[in-house]
Image: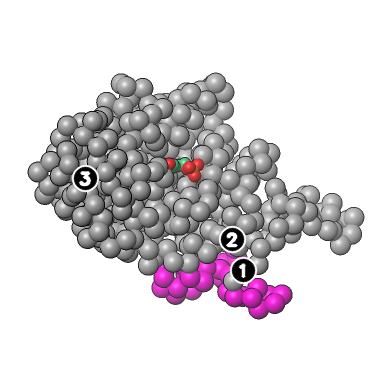
Amino acid sequence: MSDDKKSHNEHYETMVVHGDHVLDPATGAVAPPIYPSSTFAFKSADQGAELFKDPTEGFIYTRIGNPTTHILCDKIAMLEGYSHALTFSSGMAAIHAVITAYAGSGDSVIMSDTVYGGTNALCRNTMPRLGIDFRWVDCTEIDDVENAIDDTTKLMFVETPANPTMKVIDIEAMSKICKKHNIKLVVDNTFQTPYLQKPKQFGADIVMHSATKYLSGHGDLVAGLLCFDKEDFEPLFHILVDTGGILSPFNAWILLRGIKTLHVRMDRHCENAQKVAEFLEDHPKVDRVWYPGLKSHPQYELAQKQHTGHSGVIAFEIQGGREAGKKVMDTVHVCTLAVSLGDVDTLIQHPASMTHSSYSDADMAKSGITPGLIRVSVGLEHPDDIIDDLKNALDKI
Ligand code: LCS
């Protein structure tokens, strides 16, 4: 993205709609074109050879770069405030890429102790086989973070708010520690999106997204993104090209369409979730609610500083544990019993037996993922209908 394109005074909402791409220069098409081509013809043998020396100067082959995915890269980089972005076939592919770009055999990585179950499985089961030492730390405890770092530490990966417990981590505090020890700080910003939290403002080096969630917003694709500045382009680009976990041009296009309404959707997700969280907190059969917009949230003050809204995910614990939770999930009908989050549809699920079932019992207990914990991703239905649905289900236990 050129500097002149970035220097503008538009409101954020206008950037969400326009991004860096206003009109297709070839045709004037307002919606961006989809380029499904796997390969791109060279003008001459010399031009082909030149492009292989610097693939960012044009298009060679879609695993290396594609015009539709480039429009998406420019847009998400701009929204997160970085100069560059890369797109991946899933959030997991993006996490794998950022770790392998910076850590290898003999290196260590600091992980926030509560993360999505897939991230947990990747970093507890699969990647340690490469000789990387993953150190799981409660990142709300600054001393514990400091103590976990040594000369082998190359990267810190934090998910905030954490899936599913909604623990909020102080990005600025983590960034100060990372800068002191010359460690890259990666923030998984899936839950907040850049509309509600900009990790770069607090010092994050790289932002990661499961764009499957709020960025897409409609539950119709799986995608991952990394946003970063120029200095991180080479290592991340090479991992993407070498391992081939790219996003297809079709999915890049659907994602671009989803992002256009991000601000409108996120405002309503926040509004609806606040109402549902307040309802749950007042309900006699609910023991505890975790939502950063509630004063009872342990990091409420930090969330006010770090977020401009608290997004749509709520975790709550009901009386009667696992059996009562099953009853609630089997009774609801406005809420859909399904994993994933960030969709227009309200989704409800049971982390201990579903999204976080890769955790050991001990790690689950340490992270506060109890048998009675239910996660709800509040959608864009009328909030009264979501509340009535949950009320009816809670009445049945
Ligand atoms: N990071 C977070 C915070 C996530 O919630 C997920 C998926 C990922 C990364 C991985 O992204 P994916 O590869 O699925 O695009 N979270 C899911 C969840 O809570 N239910 O189903 C998927």
Query: Residue 121: x, y in percent?
Result: 46, 29
- Is tag 2's residue or tag 1's residue first in the polypeptide sequence? 1
Which residue is denoted by mark 1 in the rendering? 32
- Is tag 3's residue or tag 1's residue first in the polypeptide sequence? 1
Residues 159 and 144: in front is: 159
Task: Evaluate whether residue 212 shows in this view.
Answer: yes
Query: Residue 292: x, y in percent?
Result: 24, 49
Residue shown at the point (22%, 60%) measured from the top left? 384
- Is tag 2's residue or tag 3's residue first in the polypeptide sequence? 2
Q: Main secondary structure of the magenta part?
A: loop
Residue shown at the point (66%, 78%) measured from the top left? 28
Whether tag 2 and tag 1 are in contact, CB under 8 A, the answer is yes
Q: Secondary structure at mark 1?
A: loop
Left or right of residue 283, residue 384 in this image: right
Part of the protein shown in magenta: 1-30
Left or right of residue 67, residue 99 in this image: left
Which residue is denoted by mark 2 in the rendering? 253
Q: Which circle marks residue 393 in the picture? A: 3
Look at label 3 and name its amino acid.
Ala
In terms of image quadrants, where is residue 379? bottom left
